[in-house]
Image: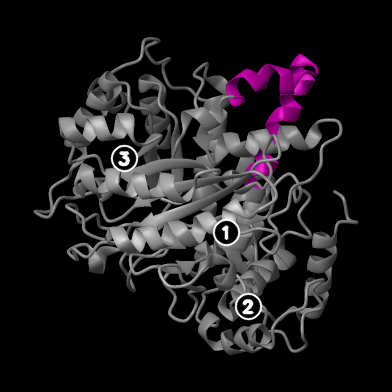
């Protein structure tokens, strides 16, 4: 990753300016973001104003999130076992009949 | 529906910049699909007038003609059901478009439920549009006519008519609890007809509890996409399946020598814009949110709209989400950050401790990397060369 790019620098600065308490990825910035490009004041005001609205988002539990990354998530996925489909292209109606027979 | 994230790359080749405008030509629809985010407006016959569209083209064409680099403007004609409008209406629209975009490459796609297809419309699709996206869930029966009956059999018949007429088309399958468990059959269906498709997880509806009973979690979507990836790897069919094959391509590109990372930098260039029926512009994450429209393209030149406070607010929101989730992601650069930037509150289980977690795309990258590593261990190097023929012409296969 080219960390020298201006865009990445601006994101790093923005991340540093946004406290960990932000919700839903929208800044509840207590300080103006230090983006490489100057921000209008309205942006910061807006970001602060949406906090309550976004607080309605239901956070997931840590347990559920950790499961997403757990090894078991992927080892559960097995190579496909379905029968080999017909090699010739079917009509949509015939294809629908075919996949219903796979059930 | 919206184009995939990988279509929002800025300079995909030859120095041409892509920008996609999703045009809500009218909300009028002959269906009443249970999950439609336009549901309250589906009986509204109001549509953009030719005069309004001409002003929109003047404002857009004027902006892109003034750019120093080459631009391709992609118009996705959307509704409602856009094919309820008469073919002569579109021919007038395209005449105005040719007048205003003289030196700019323009592509026109239409997203249709494909239930209203006559010979005149087939001729329109073949001669005036560059591609057709067909909405087809294969299973679930959530796409209903006004009488509440499933519409799919008619769509399947009409897909055959499109194919017989030589009209290029792909499909979009909305992933819900109703068809989640049949993801392999969905893959087999498209494999059998040789059609590329996009898997679009159900997202925010038009009103509270609209999706109750068939909503999907981020983890469920991730598992489904990983399954589709495995099916694709095992299949000989040359299908483009968004977002799976997009992410495979992005991952393989990121491993290539001399690869330059790509970032979704909205300050440099907006690459996807929603135009509502009344002319209001929105970014994807902010669509229809009161007060978040950047301005009205029927009344205001694009250059002026792009300087509006609302647009800057929208950009800042997208950047804040990327700063939160993407900077700590090992795949940032291969992925340009679009999924997090423009998909606000997609799934309830992707907000953790107040932080956006990119469960689906990051998880899929991780899965794909594992599968490619396994393949390299088994078959040796050269994975890119082996997969390239299956990925190279994907753009041409899925004009939706």
Tell us which disc is closer to us: 3 or 2.
3
Q: Is residue A62 left or right of residue B73?
A: right
Q: Which residue is mark 2?
A: A23
Magenta highlight on residue B372: yes
Q: Position of residue B170 (x, y in %)?
A: 39, 33
Whether discs 1 and 2 lie on one chain: the answer is no
Mark 3 lies on a secondary structure that is loop
Which quarter of the image is occupied by the C terminus of chain B? Answer: top left
Residue B335 screen position, x and y as percent? 69, 47
Label 3 sits on residue: B136
- Is B146 rendered above or below residue A98? below
Q: Which residues are magenta?
A: B363-392
- Residue bearing mark 1: B63
Q: Position of residue B192 (x, y in %)?
A: 37, 20
Frontmost residue, B162 versus A101: B162
Instruction: In the rendered view, tell whether residue A80 sits above or below residue B136.
Output: above
Quick check: can you spot residue A78? no
Give me the residue at 65% from left, 82% from top.
A43
Task: Decide whether residue B356 is among the magenta residues.
Answer: no
């Amino acid at each position: 990753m080219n960390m020298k790019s201006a865009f990445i620098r601006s994101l790093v600065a923005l991340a540093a300016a946004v406290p960990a308490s932000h919700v839903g990825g929208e800044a509840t910035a207590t300080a103006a973001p230090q983006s490489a490009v100057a921000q209008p004041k309205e942006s910061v005001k807006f970001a602060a104003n949406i906090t309550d609205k976004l607080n309605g988002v239901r956070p997931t539990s840590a347990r559920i999130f950790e499961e997403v990354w757990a090894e078991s998530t992927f080892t559960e996925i097995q190579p496909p076992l379905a029968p080999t489909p017909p090699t010739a292209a079917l009509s949509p109606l015939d294809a629908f009949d075919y996949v219903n027979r796979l059930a | 529906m919206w184009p995939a994230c990988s279509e929002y790359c800025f300079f995909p080749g030859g120095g041409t910049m892509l920008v996609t405008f999703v045009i809500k030509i009218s909300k009028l629809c002959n269906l009443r699909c249970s999950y439609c985010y336009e549901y309250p407006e589906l009986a509204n016959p109001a549509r953009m007038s030719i005069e309004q569209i001409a002003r929109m083209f003047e404002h857009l064409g004027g902006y892109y003609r003034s750019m120093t680099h080459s631009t391709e403007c992609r118009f996705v004609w959307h509704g409602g059901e856009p094919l309820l409008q008469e073919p002569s209406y579109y021919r007038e629209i395209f005449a105005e478009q040719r007048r205003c975009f003289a030196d700019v490459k323009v592509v026109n796609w239409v997203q249709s439920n494909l239930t209203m297809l006559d010979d005149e419309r087939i001729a329109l699709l073949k001669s005036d549009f560059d591609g057709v996206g067909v909405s087809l869930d294969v299973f679930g029966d959530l796409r209903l006519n006004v009488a509440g009956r499933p519409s799919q059999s008619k769509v399947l018949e009409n897909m055959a008519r499109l194919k017989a007429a030589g009209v290029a088309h792909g499909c979009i399958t909305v992933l819900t609890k109703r068809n989640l468990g049949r993801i392999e059959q969905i893959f087999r269906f498209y494999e059998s007809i040789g059609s590329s498709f996009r898997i679009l997880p159900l997202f925010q509806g038009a009103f509270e509890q609209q999706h109750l009973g068939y909503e999907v979690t981020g983890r469920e979507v991730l598992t489904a996409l990983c399954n589709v990836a495995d099916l694709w790897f095992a299949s000989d069919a040359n299908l483009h399946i968004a977002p799976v094959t997009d992410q495979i391509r992005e991952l393989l590109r990121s491993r290539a020598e001399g690869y330059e990372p790509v970032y979704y930098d909205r300050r440099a260039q907006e690459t996807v814009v929603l135009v509502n029926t009344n002319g209001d512009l929105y970014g994807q994450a902010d669509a229809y949110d009161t007060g978040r429209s950047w301005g009205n393209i029927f009344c205001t030149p694009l250059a002026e709209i792009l300087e509006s406070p609302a647009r800057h607010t929208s950009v800042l929101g997208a950047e804040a989400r990327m700063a939160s989730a993407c900077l700590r992601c090992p795949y940032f650069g291969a992925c340009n950050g679009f999924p997090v930037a423009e998909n606000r509150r997609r799934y309830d289980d992707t907000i953790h401790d107040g932080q956006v977690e990119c469960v689906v795309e990051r998880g899929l990258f991780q899965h794909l990397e594992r599968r490619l590593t396994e393949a390299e261990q088994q078959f040796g190097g050269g994975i890119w060369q082996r997969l390239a023929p299956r990925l190279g012409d994907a753009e041409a296969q899925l004009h939706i």
